[in-house]
Amino acid sequence: MSRMKKENGLLRFLISAVFFALVLTGCNGTRKYEAVDLSSETASEMSENGADPAAESTDTEPSGSGDADVQALGETAGEPLSADTESGDAASESSEMAEEASESEELSSGMSEAESVEAAREAAAAAYTAAASDDAEIAPEIPFNGHTVAIDAGHQAKANTSKEPIGPSSTTMKAKMPEGAVGTSSGVPEYEVTLTVAKKLEKELINRGYHVVMIRTSHDVNMSSAERSVAANKSGADILIRLHAGTMDNSSVYGALSTCMTSQNPYNASLHDKSYNLSKKIVDTVCGTTGTKNRGVQETDSSSDINWCEIPVCVFEMGFLSNPDEDTWLQDDGYQGKIASGIAGAVDAYFAEGN
C-alpha cells in the first residue's frame, strides 16, 4: 500500500511537471506569435492606407532602428528577453532575424537615399536652368535702334521648277525656286548652310538693337523668289539681305561677292544706289573678316531675287561650295560666325550714313 502511494505520488508529480512545462511552452509560443502578429498588423494597416512599410520606416525613423522596433514589440507583448533558456534562444533567434531585417531595411534605405540624392541633384540642375532662364527673361532688353532687317536664307529642301516672271509684268520666266548647290567635299546642301548663317546673323543683329524678319526658319517651305521679296516688302523691313553659296564648274574659283540691280533696272532702278552701297559694304566687310577673296559687286537686271524688291537689297554669295577648301570653311562654326559678324558690321555702317 505504501509503495502504491509513492508511485501514485510520483505519477501525480510527473503529470504536474508535464502540465506546467506545457503551460510554459504555450505561453512562450503565444508571446512569440503576438510579437510577429503586431508587426504584420502594422504592415497591413500601412498597406491599407496606401503606404509602403519600408518607405515609411525610411522616411520617419533613423537608420538602425529595426532592433528597437523588435524589442518594443516584444516588450509590448510582455516577453522578457531572458525569461529562460528556451525563451532566450527564441529571443536570440528573433533578434538575429530582426538584425537581418534591419540590415535589409538599411540597404533599401541606402538605395532610396542614393536615388533621392540623384533626384535632388536633377531637381537642383532644373532649378538652376529655370533660374538662369528667369534671369534671361528679366534681363534688360537691348533698346530698339529704329531699324528692321529682313533676312532670306536662300533655297529650300525641295526645289520648285514651276515658272514665274523675273519681275512685275515681265514676260521672261524663271523657275520659282531652283535647286541649290551642294558642298563638293561636305555634301551639305546650300539651303542648310544659308539657314545656319541666317540664324547666326539674326542673333548678331538682335544683339545690336535691330528688329529682324526671317523669311524662312525651316527647310520645309515652298516659297518662290518673288514671294520672298513680297514678304520682305510687307514686313516693314528697311533692307533685305539674301544669303547664298554658289557653285562653279571650275572648282578652283573661291571668294565672296554681292549682287544688286543696275541703275537702269526696269523694275526698281530707284533702289540701285542704296542697294549698291549696302552690297559693297557687306562684301568688303565680310572678306576683311574672313580673309576670303573679294569678288566685289555684280549688277544685273535678270534676277528675280532682286527685281521684285521694293526695299534696298543685297544678294550675298558667301562663297563657293564647288571649291573644296571654301566648302570646308563654310561648314565651320567659327567661320560662319565671322560671316554673320561681318554682315552685321556692314549693316551698322550702312545705317550710320543715314540710310
Image (spheres, rainbow, N blue to C red):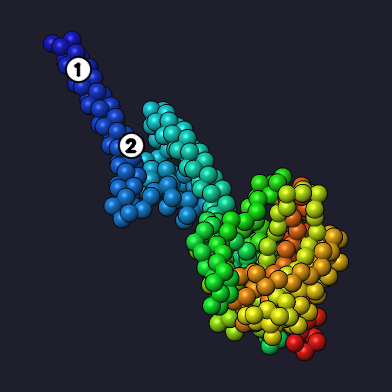
Residue 207, placed above or below residue 47? below
Between tags 1 and 2, which lies in front? 2
Asked where in the image residue 185 lies, by quadrant, the reply is: top right
Q: Which residue is mark 2?
A: 32
Q: Residue at x 65, y 56 (%)?
A: 190
Q: Secondary structure at mark 1?
A: helix
Q: Residue at x 86, y 66 (%)?
A: 288
Q: Residue at x 80, y 86 (%)?
A: 352
Q: Which mark is residue 11?
A: 1
Asked where in the image residue 219 lies, by quadrant, the reply is: bottom right
Q: Position of residue 106 (x, y in %)?
A: 51, 43
Residue type at tag 2: Lys
Q: Nearer the viewer, residue 182 or 203?
A: 182
Residue extending farthest front = 171
Residue 251, placed above or below residue 280? above
What whole-number distance in Å separates the C-alpha atoms at marks 1 and 2?
32 Å
Indicate left or right for 43 with 152 as reference: left
Task: Let me know if residue 91 appears in the view.
Answer: no
Considering only order in the chain, which callout, 2 or 1, is on the residue closer to the N terminus?
1
Asked where in the image residue 215 lies, by quadrant, the reply is: bottom right
Q: Nearer the viewer, residue 44 or 121?
A: 121
Residue 5, placed above or below residue 316? above
> Tags 1 and 2 in contact by the CB under 8 Å rule?
no
Q: Nearer the viewer, residue 317 or 266?
A: 266
Residue type at tag 1: Leu
Q: Position of residue 172 (x, y in %)?
A: 57, 69
Residue 260, placed above or below residue 191? below
Q: Residue at x 76, y 83 (%)?
A: 273
Which quadrant is the N terminus positioned in? top left
Tag 1: Cα neighbours inside 10 Å, few (<14), some, or many (≥20)?
few
Q: Nearer the viewer, residue 263 or 348?
A: 263
Task: Let me know if residue 76 appears in the view.
Answer: yes
